Amino acid sequence: MIPQDFESWRNCIVDKCRIPLTKAFAKKRLAVYTQTDHPETIAFIRLYGNEHYRRVISWFNRVIDIEN
């Protein structure tokens, strides 16, 4: 199931995948996902669609804002 809200997405990352959702992690992911020509970004959009891609970008930005 693809998360539709921040808390569900956060739960997937932190609780299910056991990845600390830190500011540093968010910045690393955004460094890739903000490059629309990056192969990983292209694959992500192909798999999950533009709408989810935009949500994930906003959620990573939210993590950065929360950590400040």
Image: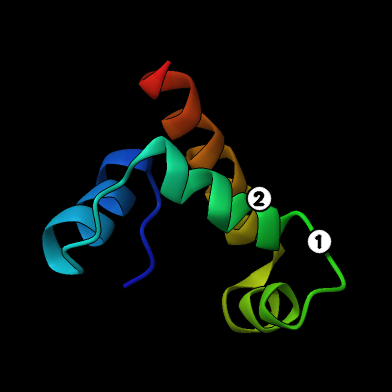
* Residue holding disc 2: 54
Residue beneath the point at 59% across and 83% down:
47
Above/below status of 43 relative to 38: below
Left or right of residue 32, residue 38 in this image: right
Closest to the observer, 50 or 16: 16
Confirm or deny contact between disc 1 and disc 2 (CB under 8 A).
no
Q: Secondary structure at mark 1?
A: loop
Amino acid on which disc 1 is placed = Gln
Q: Position of residue 36 (x, y in %)?
A: 83, 65
Above/below status of 22 relative to 9: above
Left or right of residue 9, residue 27 in this image: right
Above/below status of 3 relative to 40: above
**Marks 1/2: CA–CA distance:** 13 Å
Left or right of residue 47, residue 60 in this image: left
Q: Secondary structure at mark 2?
A: helix
Closest to the observer, 53 or 28: 28
Closest to the observer, 32 or 8: 32
Q: Position of residue 40 (x, y in %)?
A: 66, 79
Amino acid on which disc 2 is placed = Arg
Furthest toward the front, the residue is 24
Residue 52, picture quadrant: bottom right
Q: Quadrant of the C terminus?
A: top left
* Residue holding disc 1: 35
Furthest toward the left, the residue is 15
